[in-house]
């Protein structure tokens, strides 16, 4: 919350709009309650209200903290900005009041916003992520700490230190996990960071993480055990993985969604 407050002040000082990517807003509210001084006795809803009070607007991918399978929305404090943003909505998404979503999906979303901000729900969700992280730690797998609210991040740099950064070690690890265990994580690294628009060099070459995001209400702890074991299998044969991947084809922007790679 202190961070949001400071960003709010900064944005007002420089006259720049402060828009919150709200996909994980409820998990963040939970962490504010559990970790930040002065919030332990506050309700999640009140924390959420304060979080958004500092912002000019928000975008929401409802697949995350609204616990639905599709959809999203945007919100603005300034009505004029809302009108401007609505202009192209009808062409690209659907009428402004539904944005391409069906009534059923909007009802589910509204319900999800209530349920997704219940403390007991958040607690069980975030405890499952911690259960998974703890399991991996017990296997000696290097993971980022403190554990987050939606995912466990594996430090691929420590698992595949010999693969040169040009061969995308974190992507290599993610692929191994998919081929070997059928588990689809995502590289959070140089491949995702894309190229510098001016120099066309790969950005953040030293960022080498694999994110294992856990969808809500879909998995049991047995699934967590399975995924941890799948990572462990690769971890135990990490010395045999010597080479990475090279790019066959990439899109000019946001390449990681559609990139084609081949093993070296
Ligand atoms: C904070 C945040 N914003 C946005 C997204 C992407 O949402 P979408 O796939 O609906 O564009 C994610 C996905 O994990 C996310 O974590």
Image: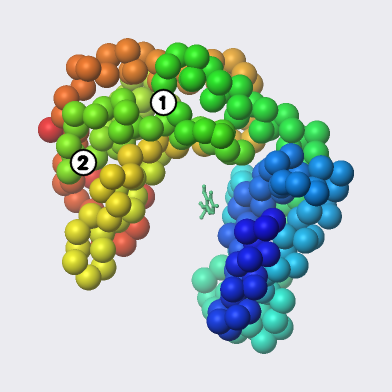
In the image, what residue occupies the spot 48% across and 20% down? 136
Q: Position of residue 221 (x, y in %)?
A: 62, 19
Q: Nearer the viewer, residue 39 or 63?
A: 39
Q: Few, some or many C-alpha atoms within 10 Å of disc 1 (few <14, some 14-19, many ≥20)?
A: some
* Quarter of the figure that contains the C terminus: top left
User: Against 195, is 63 above or below?
Assistant: above
Which residue appears farthest toward the front when viewing the image? 37
Residue 119 spot, x, y in % from top left: 80, 39
- Mark yes or no: residue 230 visible: no
Height in image: 256 above or below 155?
below
Q: Where is residue 78 in the image (x, y as percent from the top left)?
A: 70, 81
Circle 2 packing at 10 Å, graded few (<14), some (14-19), many (20+), is: many
Q: Which numbered disc, 2 or 1, marks the residue that appears first in the sequence?
A: 1
The residue shown at (61%, 53%) is 23
Alpha carbons under labels 2 and 1: distance apart: 18 Å
Q: Name the residue under label 1.
A: 142
Quarter occupied by residue 142: top left
Colour basis: rainbow
From this view, report whether residue 221 is shown above or below residue 178: above
User: Residue 22: horizontal and vertical position, in percent?
Assistant: 63, 57
| Local secondary structure at mark 2 | helix
**Quadrant position of residue 242:** top left
Classify mark 1: helix, strand or loop: loop
Q: Mark 2 points at which residue?
A: 165
The reply to whether residue 18 is visible in this rendering is: yes
Q: Is ligand 1 closer than 8 angstroms to the Cβ of mark 1?
A: no
């Amino acid at each position: 919350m202190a961070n949001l407050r400071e960003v709010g002040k900064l944005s007002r000082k420089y006259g720049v709009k402060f828009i919150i990517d709200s996909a994980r807003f409820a998990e963040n509210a939970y962490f504010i309650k559990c970790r930040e001084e002065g919030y332990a006795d506050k309700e999640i809803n009140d924390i959420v209200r304060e979080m958004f009070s500092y912002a000019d607007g928000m975008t929401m991918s409802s697949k995350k903290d609204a616990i639905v399978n599709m959809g999203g929305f945007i919100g603005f404090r300034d009505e004029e900005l809302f009108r401007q943003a609505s202009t192209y909505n009808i062409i690209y998404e659907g009428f402004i009041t539904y944005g391409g979503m069906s009534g059923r999906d909007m009802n589910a979303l509204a319900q999800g916003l209530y349920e997704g901000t219940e403390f007991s729900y958040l607690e069980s969700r975030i405890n499952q992520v911690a259960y998974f992280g703890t399991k991996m730690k017990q296997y000696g797998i290097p993971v980022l700490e403190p554990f987050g609210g939606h995912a466990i991040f594996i430090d691929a740099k420590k698992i595949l230190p010999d693969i040169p950064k040009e061969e995308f070690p974190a992507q290599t690890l993610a692929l191994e996990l998919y081929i070997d265990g059928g588990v689809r994580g995502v590289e959070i690294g140089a491949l995702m960071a894309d190229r510098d628009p001016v120099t066309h060099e790969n950005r953040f070459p030293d960022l080498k993480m694999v994110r294992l995001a856990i969808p809500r209400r879909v998995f049991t702890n047995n699934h967590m055990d399975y995924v941890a074991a799948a990572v462990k299998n690769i971890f135990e044969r990490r010395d045999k993985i010597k080479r990475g991947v090279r790019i066959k084809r990439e899109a000019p922007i946001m390449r990681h969604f559609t990139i084609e790679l081949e093993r070296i």
